[in-house]
């Protein structure tokens, strides 16, 4: 494998937007989380990384590890592109442990010699490590090449073990009708793979997308779930408002017939700023997810400072009433430094709260909403702008999130509940909202260098219980 050019590595030049307790680079571009796993006493997270610029570029695999899922140690770059199997980049993939060895399976990205960045081909490759830090690319790469009916889009393998066999799903776009789909492969040894076929396919470019990126496969409460990030879904009312989406299909995989019977596509996170989410199974049986946390098609102010992008906090995926949701992983409590507020208040109108360093806080807000006309808002402002706000409107049963600088709000329907239970995590340039124990989530980025003030707002008198902790990464 080629070496990193240490003379070209970019460094952070200004910390004004740097996160305190989210995974981020020491300098350079970050996107998709990759290779989530637990190996030899550590949680490992890899990520798409360009070390030489705060712009997207030839993809490497950055790497961090942790004992507790919230305090992370930066490790050397795990995968460097430029070998025959990945001439144009080491794109996204996943990890699995076999015989006490850590295997990475990833997409090799390749460009044709016509200077067209949109003209490429992709294959799948293996790298391995016995210490979880230093990786060797398999000398038999590539291990999977695209089927004849596939377009150039053929990437992001997610691998797992079932009944002494290995399986993986791949994101794909069909050549004949330009639709996103999921392909299934099977192996006895991780090195030799048999193609089992298409197990899920878009119903149409506008309704379910022309390409399904970053597939994830896992099982919760007896249900098989494919998560993916479709490209090309058209906005429909208050749904599918991002450039590209993130969400899930819930169903059942028949391993013998290689078929996946499933329901429709449902968004998992309703915010402006989550994509390419991946998950893994912890030793204690929880499905933990991270997502790429970025402003995507909007300006990224941190790029001027030598870095771009972050990952979300770890989230536990939960399945209730055939709906997948997310709650904060229990380990985030380890970030708590001091309790700043614990009070019951009567809110009528707009009330600002005097909180020390509100940009590094955890909030637990509980509000009874028993009247048809109840409306409640949590808001973060900098004196000039409403930076981020979340509003629940009882009459419509809808949550609305506003982000300063965005052309449109984001929405989630939770119905006419009688109590609003909010957990909110605010970092230097981000906010994550978890509503009613998995009913909805929003992932939001914001940028300011001004003094920030939190507000609680109601349209009439409402009793509110508020607990606030300072957080320290």
Image (cartoon, helix red, strand yellow):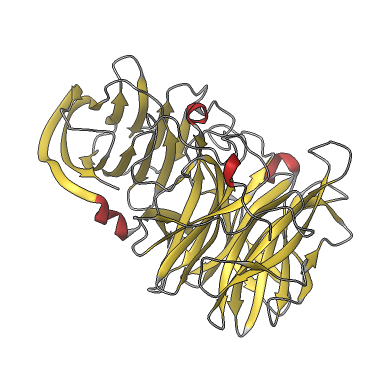
365 horizontally vs 125: left or right: left
Location of residue 429 in the rendering, given as x and y in whole percent from the top left corner: 39, 33
Between 285 and 8, the one lying in front of the other is 8
Q: Please name the residue shown 45% across and 31% down the image.
A: 13
Examine the image and state in which quarter residue 345 appears.
top left
Q: How many marks?
A: 0
Q: Residue furthest top?
A: 384
Indicate the position of residue 300 as horizontal and vertical percent values.
Answer: 52, 29
Residue 433: image quadrant is: top left
- Residue drawn at point x = 75 percent, y = 48 percent: 88
Q: Is residue 286 left or right of residue 135?
A: left
* Residue 347, horizontal then vertical, whole percent: 16, 28
**Is residue 171 visible to us here?**
no
On-image quarter of the N terminus? bottom right
Judging depth in this view, the residue of 380 and 87 nearest the camera is 87
Residue at the location (41% across, 31% down)? 401
Q: Compare residues 376 and 272 and report the one nearer the observer.
A: 272
Q: Is residue 368 left or right of residue 283?
A: left
Q: Nearer the viewer, residue 396 or 332?
A: 332
Residue 275 percent across, percent down from the top left: 55, 44
Q: From this viewpoint, which residue is outermost toward the front?
A: 7
Position above or below: 160 against 471 = below
Q: Is residue 182 visible?
A: yes
Task: Tell me what residue is drawn at x 52 percent, y 30 percent.
Answer: 303
The image quarter in which residue 418 lies: top left
């Amino acid at each position: 494998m080629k070496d990193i050019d240490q003379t070209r590595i970019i460094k952070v030049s200004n910390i004004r937007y740097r996160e305190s307790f989210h995974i981020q680079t020491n300098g350079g571009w970050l996107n998709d989380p990759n290779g989530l796993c637990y190996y030899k006493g550590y949680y490992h997270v890899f990520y798409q990384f360009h070390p030489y610029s705060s712009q997207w570029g030839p993809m490497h695999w950055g790497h961090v590890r942790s004992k507790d899922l919230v305090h992370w140690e930066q490790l050397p770059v795990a995968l460097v592109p430029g070998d025959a199997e990945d001439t144009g980049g080491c794109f996204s993939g996943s990890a699995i442990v076999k015989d006490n060895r850590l295997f990475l399976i990833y997409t090799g990205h390749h460009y044709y010699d016509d200077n067209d960045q949109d003209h490429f081909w992709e294959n799948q490759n293996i790298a391995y490590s016995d210490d979880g830090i230093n990786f060797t690319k398999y000398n038999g790469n590539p291990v999977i090449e695209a089927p004849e009916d596939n377009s150039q889009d053929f990437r992001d393998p997610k691998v797992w073990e079932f009944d002494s066999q290995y399986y993986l799903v791949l994101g794909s776009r069909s050549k004949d009708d330009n639709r996103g789909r999921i392909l299934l492969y099977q192996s006895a040894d991780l090195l030799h793979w048999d193609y089992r076929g298409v197990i899920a396919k878009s119903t149409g470019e506008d309704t379910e997308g022309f390409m399904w990126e970053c597939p994830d496969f896992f099982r919760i409460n007896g249900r098989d779930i494919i998560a993916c990030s479709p490209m090309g879904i058209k906005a429909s009312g208050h749904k599918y408002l991002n450039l590209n989406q993130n969400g899930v299909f819930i169903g059942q995989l028949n391993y013998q017939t290689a078929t996946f019977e499933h329901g429709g596509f449902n968004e998992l996170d309703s915010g402006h700023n989550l994509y390419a989410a991946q998950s893994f199974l912890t030793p204690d049986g929880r499905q933990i997810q991270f997502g790429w946390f970025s402003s995507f098609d909007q300006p990224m102010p941190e790029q001027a400072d030598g870095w771009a992008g972050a990952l979300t906090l770890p989230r536990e995926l939960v399945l209730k009433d055939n709906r997948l949701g997310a709650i904060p992983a229990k380990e985030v409590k380890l970030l708590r430094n001091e309790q700043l507020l614990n009070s019951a208040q009567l809110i009528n109108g707009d009330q600002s709260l005097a909180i020390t360093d509100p940009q590094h806080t955890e909030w637990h807000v509980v509000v009874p909403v028993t009247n048809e006309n109840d409306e409640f808002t949590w808001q973060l402002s900098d004196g000039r702008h409403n930076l981020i706000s979340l509003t629940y409107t009882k009459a419509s049963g809808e949550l609305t999130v506003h982000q300063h600088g965005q052309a449109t709000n984001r929405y989630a329907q939770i119905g006419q509940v009688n109590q609003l239970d909010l957990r909110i995590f605010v970092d230097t340039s981000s906010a994550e909202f978890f509503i009613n124990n998995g009913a909805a989530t929003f992932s939001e980025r914001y940028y300011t260098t001004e003094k920030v003030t939190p507000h609680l707002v109601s349209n009439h008198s409402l009793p509110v219980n508020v607990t606030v902790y300072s957080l320290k990464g």
